[in-house]
Structures are given as C-alpha cells and as structure tokens.
Amino acid sequence: MLNEHGVEVKSHMSSVDEETAELILEEFKGSEPEVPPTVTKVEEDTTVTGLADSLGIKRNDLVKSLMKMGVMASVNQRLGFDTLVALSEKFNFEAIKKLTSEEKLLAEEPDDPDKLEFRPPVVTIMGHVNHGKTSLLDAIRKTNVMDMEAGGITQHIGAYKVALEHGDVVFLDTPGHEAFTKMRARGAQVTDVVVLVVAADDGLMPQTREAIDHAKAADVPIVVAINKIDKENSKPDRVKQQLAEFELVPEDWGGSTIFADISALNNIGIDDLLENLGLEAELLELKANPDKPARGTVIEARVDKSRGSVATVLVQDGSLRIGDCFVAGIYSGKVRAMINDRGEHIEEAPPSTPVEVLGFSGVAEAGDKFYVLEDEKEARAISESRKAKLLEEARTGVRRKTLDLYQMLREGETKDLNVIIKGDVQGSIEALIGSLERLSTDAVKLNVIHSGVGDITENDIMLASASDAIITGFGVSLASSASGLAEKEGVRLRLYNVIYEAISDIRAAMEGLLDPELREVISGRATIIDMFSISRLGTVAGCRVDNGRILRNSSARVLRNNRTIHESKIYSLKRFSDDAREVASGQECGIMIDGFNDFELGDVIESYIYEEIPATL
C-alpha cells in the first residue's frame, strides 16, 4: 500500500513520518463498516474474531477500525476494556468489564422481592459489668417455648435461637461490647437490635456509655432493659434521666426508645422485653432470600482435637446446606456437618440461623464474611489469592498510617471525619470538643463519636477501627496493650499537650476532605500571521507567540475581535518541521486545533490549563 502511494520502504521494519501515516490511515475511511442496528453486550477479554462475529461484521473491517485507533491487533488478540469502550461508540454495543472471582464474590445483586421472606431478628446484649447481662441471657433461655421439647440448650456455640410465641429471636452470646466491635471492625454487620442492660440501683457507668457509643457506631436500634427493679434502692427514673442525655428518651417521655423494667434474677418483665423485641423486629421488616447460595458471618472459631477447625456461622442470607463449598476470610472449605444450638445435626440452615460448621481448612477469625460458591476449585483459588495478598501486605507494610493524621485528607473517601477524644480531665475534653465542633461546615462534618477521661485503651482502638475514626489524646498516654493493637488495626491517632495544635491538625484533616477548586490559568497567547492547508489533515495556523507559552495538548480557544469562536485542544504544535512540547514568547510556530480549520489572519489562539486550588473551611 505504501508503494502504491509512492512511499518507498524496504521492509516491514521501515519507519514513516506522522503525516505519511495519517495519509495511509485516511484510505481506510472509504471502507468504514456500517454500525449494526442491534445493541450487544460484549465482555472484556473477548477476541477480535469473537467481537466481529457477535457484531456481524467482517474481521478485516474490525482490524482496520482498530488500526485507526492506533491499536495494531491480530484476529486472535484479546481486547481490553478501554479498547472495547472506544469501539462501543462506533459499533453501538455495551462494553462489560470482566469481574475477578473476588469481585464476583463481593458483588451484591438485588433480590427478587417475591423471593424475600421474613427472618428472625439478631440481638446482642450489652452493658456494664455486673448489671445482669448473663442473668438476662439465662432468663431468656428458660423462656424458650422449645425448652420442654428439645431438652433445652445442650451445646454452647456462641449464638442460639429462641422460639417464642410471637416468633423466633436469635441471640448472640457475645454480650461484651469489645467482641461486638471487633466484628464491626471487620465489616461484619450481624446485629439487628442491641439490648442495653442498665442496673436500676447503679445507673449509668463507664461501660454503659461505651456500649451506647459502640451501638450508635453500628447504627442499630437500642432497646433498654432496666434490670434489678425489685431491689430496695432501685431508681429506674434516674436511669431514664441519665440515658436521656445520650438521646435515649423513653416513649412515655415523648421519645422513641423502648424501655423495659425487668428483674432477670426473679424473672420479672422478661416476657414484656421479648414482646418489645418482636415489635422492634416488625418495624425493621427484616427479610432475606432463602433460595440462593448462603452468605453469613463467622461468630467464633476454634480447633477441636477430634473434628479439626470448627466455626460458628450466622447465616444471614440464602440457605447453607451439607456439601456446600465456601470461603471465609483467607480459608476455604466444604460443609461436612452442621450442628445447631441444641446439639442436633441438621441438613439445611435458612437465614438468621446460627450453626456450627465443620470443614474449614483453617481457623477463621470472628467477623470474617462467609460465602458459598458453586465451585470448590474457585473457593480454593480465592483463598490462596487472599493469603498471598495478606503475605504481600505483611512484607511491604501496606496499611493505614498509624500516627499520620493527614492520611485521611489524601484518601478523600468521605466528607465526614469521625473523632474519638480522650483527655486527662473532663474540663479539657469539653473545651476541645467545643472547639472542634465549631469547625463543622455544610461541606465537611466532624463527628465526636466518643470521649472520656483516661489513657487510650484497647476499647478505644477497636471503636476507632470499627468507625474509621481518628483518636485525639490530650494530656494522656497510650496504654502499652493498646499500642500493638493500634498498629495491627491501622488506627490513626495523635497525642497532644497543647490544645491549639490538636485543633490545627484536625482542621487540616477536614480541609483535606474538601474537593479542590479548579482555576483556569492562561499559559500563553499567539497571533495568526499565516495559514497552510495540508491535504487530508486540515489547516495549520502559522503563529507568533506574543506572551507566555503555547503548550501542546493544552486547552485552547480561538479569539476573533476579542470574541471566542471556537474552544477545544491543541493537538499539533511544531517549530519548523519538528514537534514541540511548548513554544515560548517571541517564537513562531505551527498550530493545529482539534475540530477547527476556519482560521483568519489576525485571529488569536489562547492556550490555558486548569490548576487545583486547595479548599479551606
């Protein structure tokens, strides 16, 4: 073809200049394939032959179209997503990105509403030490109407289902807020309702306050159980007053929080509490699809000498069956046996069912997401991929910077900044909170999700990890046990002794979450003093740069009599016959503007770029 156009080349290794290449490519325009009338979905990684066949066009025509895009491809070459997107505009099809096995696993496809069925609520009991959490759990076990039939709960598996007259309720036997938050820290939303137990004779205590913070961080409804109301020194109204300060206002006071007066030890008010839990579940309208592969969360795991790696799994969606292949965290496996909370072997576990699963390849961690896959080979591949990624991160130290408060401003993933504040005295905490809350604007909001007096503890670290928060310590230190945990969980924290330094750093972090402002900056102006027409390429404007610099590939506008007549980009810039990146003031050059050829002598070409200006509060 080159020889036919008078261009002498010796072999396929010869080179040609850009203008000659443009001329040759123009020859293809005469044989442009017609766009098929039907719309087709084409997935990434398809071959040229496969795409041509699906579109109903000749393979050579598709190869020619790829050549004009600058892509030299054989008929057996596989096409990437970007190339497919470029072709889709011409051939009227939709390019589909090919998902990896991990992406397919994590993809949440909407369920058919007709297949959704109501599921039992999952409840976690939280509160201060010695306020009656264990006693309440024991009382609930005795209330189980299945108790007489199944002989009670004979096996502790970390979670159990109670059959009540108005429906089933699933209780997690992890009442401590620390265990609750560890699962939240790993992205495991397992709890639908939190029962906050407060002793009527003791009132609000530090762990009660922490439990409230953890429940709010999980964004789940709270039902308050005021325990020990039968004691002589009980003061339930004082408890309600204290909780009202934390936005937990009883319904009989005009609020929306359900309160129940109980005595777990003497079985007073337990039925009323369970009835309220049923009402709360009805309001939540909890539904799941039992007719799909199971998804759930690992509640706890251990090694059994006779049975190997065993884990308690809460099935949250779909149904788990014997023989299902699965992956949980970095481990895979196949369900060899399932045992419910009464020690019975079962064949199938529908949504909101806690079961002990045998068949894990290793000991999973609490909070790991549990997925059933159709192919055991695929499950093992995902497991190995996750292990390799974990090993690589351990080698390279890839994690969130522990002590770098400014990491957030680079990530820019959210417009909310969550903060935990620990101080030496309450007065300092109140002063710091007041100063920080005044920094909130409509563009970026600061949320103080927890504050308290004393050193930074493991509970603070876990709450920060679960809530993606930063920890600010004022006049306090980091407990030795919490230091290693902070590094492991990748929690960002800083300690201060001067209040304005803390405020300044948090202000900087908030400003980093704001989108920068784009500002137009004119880089140069050039006047057209001559014009040259090149066949099949267009018109070249011969210019003299009056001031600044003309930049290749920069945005540009053509001005005539100080009015803009065209605006696009400079796609060709030459000094004499050589390509140039930029041409400075006082020099002459040739300029070609994308999509414009109607130049006139005296027109002005203005080159400009956009700069990012950091935003401020």
Image (spheres, rainbow, N blue to C red):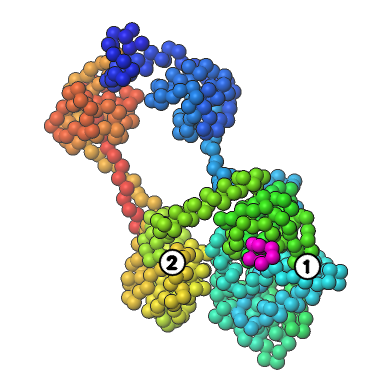
**Magenta span main SS:** strand
Q: In the rendered image, which quarter is residue 18 located in?
A: top left
Asked if 126 appears above or below 50 in the picture, the reply is below
Q: How crowded is mark 2: few (under 14 residues within 10 Å), some or many (20 or more)?
A: some
Label 2 SS: helix
For the point 55% across and 25% down, the residue is 50
Rendering coords of residue 102 (x, y %): 56, 47
Asked if 552 appears above or below 33 in the picture, the reply is below
Q: Which residue is tagged 2?
A: 487
The magenta stretch spans which residues? 303-311
Is residue 223 visible in the rendered image? The answer is no
- 308 in magenta: yes
Query: Which of the two residues, 89 or 528, is positioned nearer the viewer here?
Result: 89
Residue reaching furthest to the bottom: 232
Is residue 290 visible in the rendered image? The answer is yes
| Residue 107, numbered label | none
598 relative to 248 in the view: left or right: left
Q: In the rendered image, which quarter is residue 341 located in?
A: bottom right
Label 1 amino acid?
Arg
Q: Which residue is tagged 1?
A: 342
Rendering coords of residue 576 (x, y %): 17, 23
Q: In the rendered image, which quarter is residue 429 located in?
A: bottom left
For the point 47% across and 69% down, the residue is 485
